[in-house]
């Protein structure tokens, strides 16, 4: 009996020490976007009282699980249920009101009328198709006096996480300290608000189609690569001309292992050209500051066994990694520019 007692205590202690710590998990997976204090950065401020006091634990759990496809927030599918619960418990510590229970009541309304009301009262912030506000978090990509951007409502992650009653309550009461005002105070009736909720819920089909388009980029190669019929020096000169022709500014030309190899002992057969279009750079950074991780642009030229090859990153693949539909157009434009540049240099 004594042995069983000690085994129980041992198992209990193991469970205590192995239990996930929400603060550590938040720091590892969430703080880089939402800030250490939850007040935002690239991601939106989730410690904002008007937000954290108005959402259920189920909403937070589903948001972590599903993310927001095409809207910065990734889906954390690799976390265990215990880890997700620990993060939610930690985040809930910022609330100063009791947690709201999940309410799965289905709101009935007139979708057609809801669309008209949405266009008049909601589209200015959330977009005419519910695609959400522009930019990210509380960075320089938008005015700092706005504590949060309008979320994308036409989004499978949002629609999976948000109940009808949560959407209704948000529209009805607004969120203090954000641009989201009470639509009840603004003059909408309860019936009007139900119609808007029904219209938002009708986004589910188009949201699924948007996610499908996002997943297609999985097939894109991470690198654009072409063989050059010219020798190394000619290829480099061709690239310099192509860079200028594409309205880029050549910043510098380096050996690929510059800074890694001892000065003077770099591999002369591996060269990288750094270039930039500063107007394009500013526009892209305004949409998503994370673009800075792969800018300025680079093209690598490698000569091996008498063959010359040029390569650069594929912006379409990066677009998938960034999970930002708004950035997709810029990545497509950048892809065409890169492809043209490589083709011009290797013709």
Image: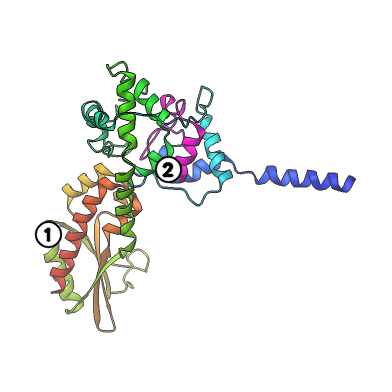
The front one of 81 and 32 is 81
Q: SS at mark 2?
A: helix
* x, y percent for residue 176: 37, 21
Q: Which residue is mark 1?
A: 246
Indicate how the structure is coloured in the image.
rainbow
Q: Taking 331 as reference, is 322 left or right?
A: right
Q: Quadrant of the N terminus?
A: top right
Magenta region: 38-65
Q: Taking 248 as reference, is 134 left or right?
A: right
Magenta stretch contains residue 55: yes
At 35% from the left edge and 63% from the top edge, which residue is drawn? 259
Q: Tell me which numbered mark, 1 or 2, is placed earlier along the sequence.
A: 2
The front one of 298 and 102 is 102
Q: In the displayed image of the protein, which residue is found farthest to the right?
A: 1
Magenta stretch contains residue 4: no
* x, y percent for residue 335: 21, 59
Q: Which residue is mark 2?
A: 32
* x, y percent for residue 88: 52, 36
The CA span between labels 1 and 2 is 35 Å
At 24% from the left edge and 81% from the top edge, which residue is drawn? 307
Q: In the displayed image of the protein, which residue is found farthest to the bottom?
A: 305
Q: SS at mark 1?
A: loop
């Amino acid at each position: 009996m004594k042995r069983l007692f000690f085994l129980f205590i041992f198992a209990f202690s193991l469970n205590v020490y192995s239990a996930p710590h929400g603060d550590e998990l938040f720091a590892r997976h969430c703080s880089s976007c939402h800030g250490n204090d939850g007040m935002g950065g690239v991601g939106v401020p989730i410690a904002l009282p008007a937000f954290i006091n108005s959402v259920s634990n189920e909403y937070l759990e589903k948001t972590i699980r599903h993310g927001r496809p095409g809207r910065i927030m990734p889906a954390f599918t690799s976390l265990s249920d215990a880890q997700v619960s620990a993060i939610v418990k930690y985040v809930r510590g910022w609330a100063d009101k009791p947690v709201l229970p999940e309410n799965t009541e289905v709101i009935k309304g007139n979708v057609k009328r809801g669309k008209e009301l949405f266009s008049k009262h909601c589209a200015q912030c959330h977009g005419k198709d519910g695609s959400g506000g522009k930019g990210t978090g509380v960075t320089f990509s938008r005015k700092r006096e706005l504590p949060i951007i309008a979320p994308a409502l036409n989004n499978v992650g949002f629609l999976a996480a948000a109940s009808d009653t949560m959407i209704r309550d948000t529209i009805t009461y607004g969120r203090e300290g954000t641009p989201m005002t009470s639509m009840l105070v603004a003059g909408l009736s309860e019936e009007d608000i139900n119609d808007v909720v029904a219209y938002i819920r009708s986004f589910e089909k188009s949201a699924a189609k948007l996610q499908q388009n996002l997943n297609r980029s999985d097939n894109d190669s991470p690198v654009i690569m072409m063989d050059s019929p010219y020798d190394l020096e000619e290829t480099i000169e061709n690239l310099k001309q192509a860079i200028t022709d594409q309205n880029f500014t050549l910043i510098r030309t380096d050996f690929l292992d510059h800074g890694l190899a001892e000065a003077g002992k770099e591999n002369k057969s591996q060269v990288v050209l750094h270039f930039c279009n500063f107007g394009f750079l500013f526009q892209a950074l305004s949409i998503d500051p994370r673009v800075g991780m792969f800018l300025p642009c680079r093209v690598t030229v490698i000569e091996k066994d008498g063959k010359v090859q040029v390569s650069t990153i594929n912006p379409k693949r990066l677009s998938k990694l960034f999970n930002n539909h708004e950035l997709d157009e810029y990545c497509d434009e950048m892809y065409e520019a890169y492809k043209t540049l490589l083709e011009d240099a290797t013709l």
